[in-house]
Image (cartoon, rainbow, N blue to C red):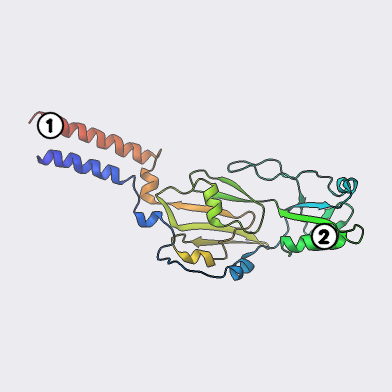
């Protein structure tokens, strides 16, 4: 085998290897072993409370259909329509004084409560006038995901949307993405905080950012080489053209030896 042919093969191997990522960067939970643990404490510490600016779906019902129309003038509540877009959101927005204004009941304070807690308060108020009322409360929130294959807005209807669910709904991550450097930016109680999450580590399950909150922003950092030589990146096109020209030149020289 001539030296020129070896060079051509070497260049092609380099080009192909740039499209691949080391396996250790692709899979999750490094060092994790089969185990069993109680998740109640993690959920209780991470569960979000209703705060100013949140929008809620509140459905109130009794055994009398005519009363239900009065209690639910907003009709059917519609949330996000999927990744990359959403329908018009109808619901009750929490005011600065932590209240929402409901039909018949008037102003009800829900700020600082969980979804279940808010439903219980509304049901108690409703029970004064109506017998055996039914109340259902859900969040009409959203989470923004960037740096994935299909970045966009993921709807959040309860307190148990995890960071993995949000990423999965956004088309997963590219093989070259930095799973060990995922940013979560959160606004809560008038403060903005940011945290760097390592999805390669099983410690992510105990992170306060494992369960997402409405308006969280997730950003997945790209690998530097992957972003330069990734699909549709200018660097990849330039490298491919340069490699192709170099291969043609070497092939031409081989044919004329």
Q: Quadrant of the N terminus?
A: top left
Seen from the viewer's position, the closer of residues 168 and 216 is 168
Query: Of helix, strand and loop, which one carries label 2?
Result: helix
Q: Label 1 neighbourhood size at 10 Å, few (<14), some (14-19), many (20+)?
A: few
Query: Of helix, strand and loop, which one carries label 1?
Result: helix
105 vs 136, left or right, is right
In the rendered image, residue 8, in percent from the top left (x then y), is placed at 18, 39
Question: Who's the residue at 36% across and 57% down the image?
Answer: 24
Residue 110 in sight here: no
Of all residues shown, which one is farthest toward the right? Answer: 129
Q: CA distance from mark 2 to mark 1?
A: 83 Å
Question: Who's the residue at 36% across and 43% down the image?
Answer: 229
Question: Who's the residue at 78% across and 52% down the image?
Answer: 58
Q: Mark 2 sits on what residue? A: 122
Image marks 2 and 1: residues in contact by CB distance under 8 Å? no
Seen from the viewer's position, the closer of residues 37 and 164 is 37
Q: Quadrant of the C terminus?
A: top left
Seen from the viewer's position, the closer of residues 225 and 127 is 127
Snapshot quadrant of residue 77:
top right
Of all residues shown, which one is farthest toward the front? Answer: 63
In the rendered image, residue 184, in percent from the top left (x then y), is placed at 54, 58
Q: Label 2 neighbourhood size at 10 Å, few (<14), some (14-19), many (20+)?
A: many
Camera-near label (2 vs 1) is: 2
Image disc number at residue 253: 1
* 28 versus 226 height, above or below: below
Snapshot quadrant of residue 79:
top right
């Amino acid at each position: 085998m001539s030296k020129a042919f070896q060079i051509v093969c070497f260049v092609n191997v380099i080009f192909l290897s740039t499209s691949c990522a080391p396996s250790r960067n692709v899979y999750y939970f490094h060092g994790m072993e089969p185990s069993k643990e109680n998740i109640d404490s993690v959920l209780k510490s991470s569960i979000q409370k209703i705060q100013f600016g949140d929008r809620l779906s509140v459905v109130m019902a009794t055994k009398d259909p005519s009363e239900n129309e009065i209690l639910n003038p907003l009709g059917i509540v519609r949330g996000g329509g999927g990744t990359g877009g959403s329908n018009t959101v109808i619901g009750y927005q929490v005011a600065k004084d932590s209240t929402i204004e409901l039909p018949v009941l008037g102003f009800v304070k829900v700020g600082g409560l969980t979804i279940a807690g808010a439903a219980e308060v509304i049901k108690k108020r409703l029970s004064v006038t109506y017998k055996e009322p039914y109340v259902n409360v859900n969040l009409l929130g959203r989470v923004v995901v960037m740096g994935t294959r299909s970045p966009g807005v993921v709807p959040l209807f309860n307190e148990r949307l995890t960071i993995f669910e949000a990423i999965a709904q956004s088309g997963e991550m590219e093989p070259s993405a930095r799973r060990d450097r995922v940013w979560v930016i959160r606004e809560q109680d008038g403060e903005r905080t940011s945290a760097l999450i390592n999805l390669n580590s099983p410690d992510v399950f105990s992170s306060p950012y494992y369960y997402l909150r409405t308006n969280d922003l997730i950003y997945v950092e790209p690998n530097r080489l992957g972003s330069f030589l990734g699909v549709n990146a200018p660097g990849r096109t330039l490298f491919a053209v340069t490699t192709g020209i170099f291969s043609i030149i070497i092939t031409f020289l081989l044919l004329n030896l």
